[in-house]
Image (spheres, rainbow, N blue to C red):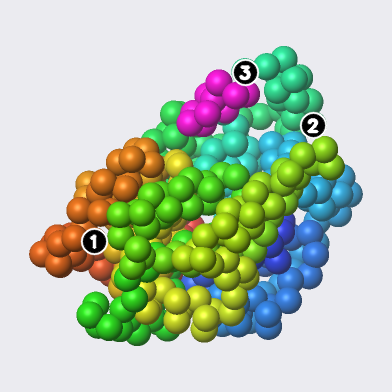
Amino acid sequence: MARILIIHPTLMAKGGGELVCMNVLEALQEKHDVDLLTVSDPDFTDLNKYYATSVTNINIRLIDGLSAISHRLPKNRFGKLKMAFLESYIINNNLGDKYDLLFSTYNELRVPCKSIQYIHFPYTDRNVHPNADDFSTSIYSAYDWVCDVVGPSLQGNKENTEYLSNSDWTGDKVDKALGVNSRTVYPPVDTSDFDPLDWESRENGFVTVGRISPEKNILRNINIISKLHKRNDDVHYHIIGPKMDRYSSPFSESYCDKVMRKCEKYEFIHHEGEVSRDRLIELISTHKYGLHGMDHEHFGIAVAELIAGGTIPFVPQGGGQQEVVGHCDDVMYDSVDDAVQKIESILRSEEKQKSVQQKLPNIDENFGRSRFQYEIKQITDEVVS
């Protein structure tokens, strides 16, 4: 039995990173003495229900000081600064000496001890970001300098660290950013509650799952569906996900408002909002197609769920989502017109529909929860020993 500290500051955010953390906790809790380093006490009853996990008997170690304050800032803001404060907190409290292993499920950390680091996307080098040119300003240079001052003056113990990435695509970015050879461990996708209808019994419609925010490209999705509807008025579209107005301004219409106005314009487009898990399963399992809009998605749990539910999902080219659809060119698009053309060709051909379904991977086998937890146990035993 090893003493292991799992590091995840904001477990109640309920995103993909938190899904990974809960499954790591569940995988390691029986064999090892596991603590969780976080900002506030998590509600494991709520989290276990949300993620269908069984995490129990985890000791909580609360972060305090500037690190705790920084992690109460908006989730998608000041990520590099938050990590710098967290690194300093870990080193100043000698946590590396108190545990046999530090396991970060919250991206890379510069720590001078044995560790496993699960990286959703590297934050330390902006040059590997797909939109790197957007960050080449003096403001970002000044911000990086502040983060370097706040963080520890060390590079971390790379020789004694196992770097894990959520896709081969992300792994390539990790290797370039950190100068390491990372290992891909796909996130856990829960397929247990999907019981897809026969293809012939499904509605000839599309489903999107994800928050309503600019990076999800919902407006582009609507444009694709509206063009398809002009050619085939039998199609319709369900948008599932909460509104996320973090980009809104008092002087301009928010992205969510634009999406809502577009939805109201078309009677064949329905914004479902944030729905229950049962309703999510119902919509996916009763429709033939999925539509994903985010470019450079790091992995794409929503895409995996669309396949698990029996749909044929269409995704942008690029990112880890290519791996989720098995690099099937028939369902990957690079523009609105390309999406319309590829989707329409499949809509019109039952033979193509069957062919694409056979090309899509087995989600439980390739991305399932038991597979993830088995890999985590194996890697942890390797590193600890």
Amino acid carrying mark 2 in the image: Val
Amino acid carrying mark 3 in the image: Ser
Residue at numbered disc 2: 150
Residue name at image x 58 percent, y 53 percent? 262
Foreground pick, 313 / 40: 313
Label 1 crowd (10 A; few <14 / some 14-19 / many >=20): some
Q: Sequence-wise, which precedes: disc 2 or disc 3?
A: 3
Residue numbers of the magenta segment: 126-135
Task: Indicate whether 193 appears above or below 377.
Answer: below
Quarter-of-image position of residue 87: top right
Q: Sequence-wise, which precedes: disc 3 or disc 1?
A: 3
Whole-number angstrom distance, CA of label 2 to CA of label 3: 21 Å
Foreground pick, 363 / 55: 363
Q: Quadrant of the C terminus?
A: bottom left
Quarter-of-image position of residue 19: bottom right
Whole-number angstrom distance, CA of label 3 to CA of label 1: 43 Å
Amino acid carrying mark 1 in the image: Leu
Residue that protrudes farthest toward the left in the picture: 351
Residue at numbered disc 3: 136
User: Secondary structure under badge 3?
Assistant: loop
User: Secondary structure under badge 1?
Assistant: helix
Label 3 crowd (10 A; few <14 / some 14-19 / many >=20): few
User: Image check: 41 left or right of 194?
Assistant: right
Q: Position of residue 211 (x, y in %)?
A: 60, 58
Q: Which mark is residue 347?
A: 1
Labels 2, 3: front one: 3
Task: Indicate whether 139 appears above or below 47.
Answer: above
Q: Position of residue 68 (x, y in %)?
A: 83, 52
